[in-house]
Image: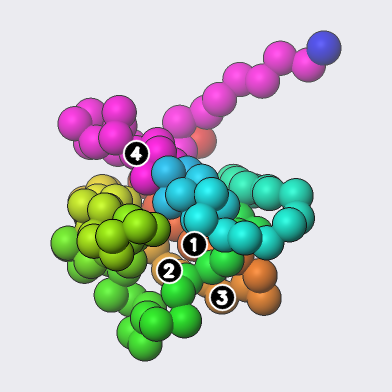
Amino acid sequence: MAQLRPKRLAQLEPKWVAQLRPFYLLVNSIDAFIISKEDRERKIIVKVSSNTKEIILDYYDNGPGLSKDITEPEKIFEPLFTTKRNQHTGEEEGTGLGMWLVKSIVEENDGNAQLLYPEIGFGLKITFPIKYKR
C-alpha cells in the first residue's frame, strides 16, 4: 500500500485551520439532499489539485442546486443570507453564516471562492496561492 506524504504548499493562519473544513459546504449539501424530492443517488465530490501557482479545491454535489428564487447567486456569500426554511412553518431555519464564513476564511488566507454552475447541483471552486517553493 502506498504511503501518502503531504507537502506544505500553502500556509494558513492557525486560527482558521480548524475551521477550514468543508463542514459548511457539507451541511448545505446534506440539507439540500433531505429537502429535495428527487429520486437519485446523492453524490458530493471534492477534488484537490495544484499547479505552480495555486492549490485548487473543486466542490460539487448533485443536489437541487441554488434555489431558482436567487436572482443574484453571489448573495449566498453575504452574512445572514439564507434560503433554508422550515417545511411546515416557512420560517427561516438557517443562520446565513455558512457560505459567508467559507468565503471569509478563504479570502483571509489570500484565496478566492468562485461559484461554479454545473448542469445539476451546486459547485464551488476555492483557490489558494502557493506561498512556499519546494
Q: Main secondary structure of the magenta part?
A: loop
Q: Disc 4 marks which residue? A: 20
Q: Which mark is residue 61?
A: none
Q: Disc 3 marks which residue? A: 117
Report crowding for label 4: few under 14, some 14 to 19, many 20 or more residues within 10 A (C-alpha): some
Report crowding for label 3: few under 14, some 14 to 19, many 20 or more residues within 10 A (C-alpha): few
Q: Nearer the viewer, mark 2 or mark 3?
A: 3
Mark nearer the N terminus (3 vs 4)? 4
The secondary element bearing badge 2 is classed as: strand
Alpha carbon separation for disc pair 4 and 1: 14 Å
Q: Nearer the viewer, mark 3 or mark 4?
A: 3
Contact (CB < 8 A) between labels 2 and 1?
yes
The secondary element bearing badge 4 is classed as: loop
Contact (CB < 8 A) between labels 2 and 3?
no
Rendered residue at 78%/16% (across/down): 2
Alpha carbon separation for disc pair 3 and 4: 22 Å
Q: Position of residue 62 (x, y in %)?
A: 65, 59
Residue type at tag 2: Gln
Which span is picked out in magenta?
Answer: 2-25
Alpha carbon separation for disc pair 2 and 3: 10 Å
Mark nearer the N terminus (3 vs 1)? 3
Q: Disc 2 marks which residue? A: 114
Q: Which mark is residue 124?
A: 1
Mark nearer the N terminus (2 vs 4)? 4
Residue type at tag 1: Leu
As drawn, is 15 to the left or to the right of 132?
Answer: left
Residue type at tag 3: Tyr
- Which corner quadrant of the image does residue 81 belong to? bottom left
Alpha carbon separation for disc pair 2 and 4: 16 Å
Q: Position of residue 74 (x, y in %)?
A: 33, 76
Mark nearer the N terminus (2 vs 1)? 2
Report crowding for label 2: few under 14, some 14 to 19, many 20 or more residues within 10 A (C-alpha): few
